[in-house]
Image (cartoon, rainbow, N blue to C red):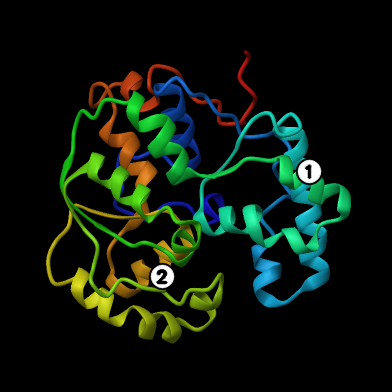
Amino acid sequence: VNRIFGEPDGLDGALPLPRAVVALALRAGRPVWIPEEVTGTCCATIWHSKGYDSGNTLMANRMIAAAWEWTEHGRLPLVVDASSCTLGIAHEVVPYLTEENRDRHAALTVLDSLEWAAEELLPRLTVSEKVASAVLHPTCSMQHLGDEAELRQLADACAEEVVVPLDAGCCGFAGDRGMLHQELTAAATAREAEEVTARPFDAHLSANRMCEIGLEHATGRPYHSVLIALERATRPAAGTAASVEGGRAPDPTGRRPRA
């Protein structure tokens, strides 16, 4: 969903999330790669949430079989850049897997990008420029995964003041429901949106594109991934090519880096 729906307007100079993730990883000395054959695989959540059991079963097994190869049979962790997708791959696919893929799944390490960035990247990065203020939207998936604290930790590295609205809750977007029934999202986010729009913020951060779109609809503000903000905050020297890509250009084709 991060590649399909892209980033909001108003993020001049920011990298798209997949490139920001690669740039951050290189900058921290923890390089990642995007599999060349990622096309045609996903977390299966969209089928699961709609009750399409046959599609869910097909995609769940396709995803885990692919992840088994990508991770060298579980040797490497699998980092997922959207919290709802992490929840899907790490937990929700399990009942739909074949016995073989269930054994494979048990050997995989599936990491949400928030947990991975907070534990593996942030200690190895130097923050060069913070914005004055940021507001956060913790998502339902983050609550299930238990990584709301990591969202806050990463945001603290990007902004001097970080605010979590008192009425922050489920945005009601629910996959694609917020596109088909915008009144659902409008009702679910009314109190949070009122709080967010009562004052200006320099950044509006989360880590799940559909939820970010829901908050954009509700507030008119450009919500985006905290990892995009972290990439900007840790550039060595603003305005240089090296600062944007951390000194090395992430391969946009996602080829695996040489050992």
For image coordinates 54% across by 59% down, the residue present is 84
Residue topped by disc 1: 104
Query: Could you say where residue 57 lies in the image, as x and y percent from the top left?
Result: 81, 63
Residue topped by disc 2: 214
Assess disc 1: are there few (<14), some (14-19) or many (≥20) residues with their C-alpha within 10 Å of its C-alpha. Answer: some
Q: Secondary structure at mark 1?
A: helix
Assess disc 2: are there few (<14), some (14-19) or many (≥20) residues with their C-alpha within 10 Å of its C-alpha. Answer: many
Query: Could you say where residue 207 lies in the image, as x and y percent from the top left?
Result: 42, 53
Q: Quadrant of the N terminus?
A: bottom right
Query: Could you say where residue 30 lies in the image, as x and y percent from the top left?
Result: 48, 24
226 is higher (above) or lower (below) than 51: above
For image coordinates 71% across by 34% down, the residue present is 74
The amino acid marked with disc number 2 is: Gly
Residue sitting nearer the eye, 36 or 230: 230
Q: Is residue 166 left or right of residue 72?
A: left
For image coordinates 24% across by 41% down, the residue present is 158
The amino acid marked with disc number 1 is: Arg
Tag 2 near tag 1, CB within 8 Å: no
